[in-house]
Amino acid sequence: MEERIRLSILLDIYGELLTEKQRNVLDLYYNQDLSLAEIAEHTSTSRQAVYDIIKRCHMLLVHYEDKLNLMEEKKNIEENKKGIIDFIDSLYSDKNAEVLDKIKNYIMNNI
Amino acid sequence: MEERIRLSILLDIYGELLTEKQRNVLDLYYNQDLSLAEIAEHTSTSRQAVYDIIKRCHMLLVHYEDKLNLMEEKKNIEENKKGIIDFIDSLYSDKNAEVLDKIKNYIMNNI
C-alpha cells in the first residue's frame, strides 16, 4: 500500500488520540495534499513546526498500529465478511435461493 | 459492569500501549487482585509509586476507550454475531436444515 494512503487510513483510525491541531495538520498533509508551506500559512504555524508535527505524529500513528493492529483487524473483518458471502454463494440452489438471499442481506447490513 | 472487571478488559485491549512495568502492576492489581503493599513488594517499588502507576494508567485506559471505543466495538461485534445466528435459527425448516447448519458453522469459525 502506498505510504500516504496508509497514513491517511491510520489517521482515520487513531486520529482521536492526537490533539485537534495535530489532526488538522495531518489531515491537510495526508488527505488534502497541501505542501508544508501551505499548511504553515493555513494554520498560522512555522514551516518547521508543521514539519515537526507531521514527523512526530507519523511516528505516533505507526506506533499505535504496531501495538493495536486495528488497520489489520478491520481488513480481516472485511475479508471475513467477503468469505462468508462467498461461502453462502457457493451453496445456492433453486430450492434455497430465497432463504439464502435473506441471510446474505442480513449479514450485509449487520457486520 | 463492575469497575474492576471493566478495567481488566480495558487492560487486555489497550495494555500494549503501556510500558511493561505499568502493564505488570495493573495486571497484579486488576487481574491477580493483589494489594498495593503486595504489588510494591513483588515489583521492588514503593507503595506510593505503585499507587501513582495505577491511578495514572487507570486514567490512560479510560482515555483510550473514550477515544477509540474498542471495548464497545468488540461488544457490538459479539452482539452482531449472535444476531446473525439468531436470524438464521429463525429460518430453519426440514428442507433447509443442512445448508443452514453449514452456514452457521462457517460463521461461528470466521467472525
Image (cartoon, coloured by chain):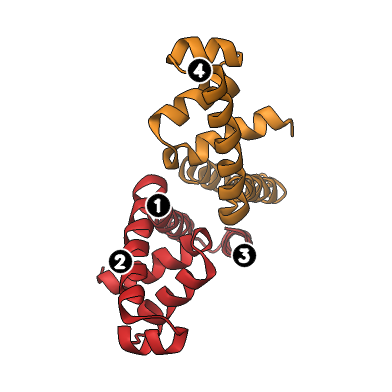
Chain colours: A red, B orange
Task: State the residue position of label 3.
Answer: A109
Callout 2: helix, strand or loop?
helix
Callout 3: helix, strand or loop?
helix
Q: Residues within 10 Å of mark 1 (few under 14, many from 20)?
A: some
The mark closer to the camera, 1 or 3, is 1
**Pointers 2 and 1 in contact (C-beta within 8 Å):** no
Q: Does residue A76 appear left or right of residue B59 in this picture?
A: left
**Residue A43: which disc?**
none
Can the viewer see residue B75 in this picture?
Answer: yes
What is the three-letter code of the residue carrying label 3? Asn
Judging from the image, mark 3 belongs to the subunit labelled: A
A105 vs A13, nearest the viewer: A13
- What residue is shown at x 60% (from left), y 51% (from top)? B73
- Please tell me which of labels 2 and 1 falls first in the chain: 2
- Please tell me which of labels 1 and 3 falls first in the chain: 1
What is the three-letter code of the residue carrying label 2? Lys
- Disc 1 to disc 4, C-alpha distance: 30 Å
Q: Quadrant of residue B89?
A: top right
What is the three-letter code of the residue carrying label 1? Tyr
What is the three-letter code of the residue carrying label 4? Ser
- Please tell me which of labels 2 and 3 falls first in the chain: 2
The image position of residue A17, as x and y in percent, is: 51, 58
- Disc 2 to disc 4, C-alpha distance: 37 Å
Q: Residues within 10 Å of mark 2 (few under 14, many from 20)?
A: few
Task: State the residue position of label 4.
Answer: B46
Task: State the residue position of label 2.
Answer: A55
Judging from the image, mark 1 belongs to the subunit labelled: A
**Pointers 4 and 3 in contact (C-beta within 8 Å):** no
**Pointers 1 and 4 in contact (C-beta within 8 Å):** no
Judging from the image, mark 2 belongs to the subunit labelled: A
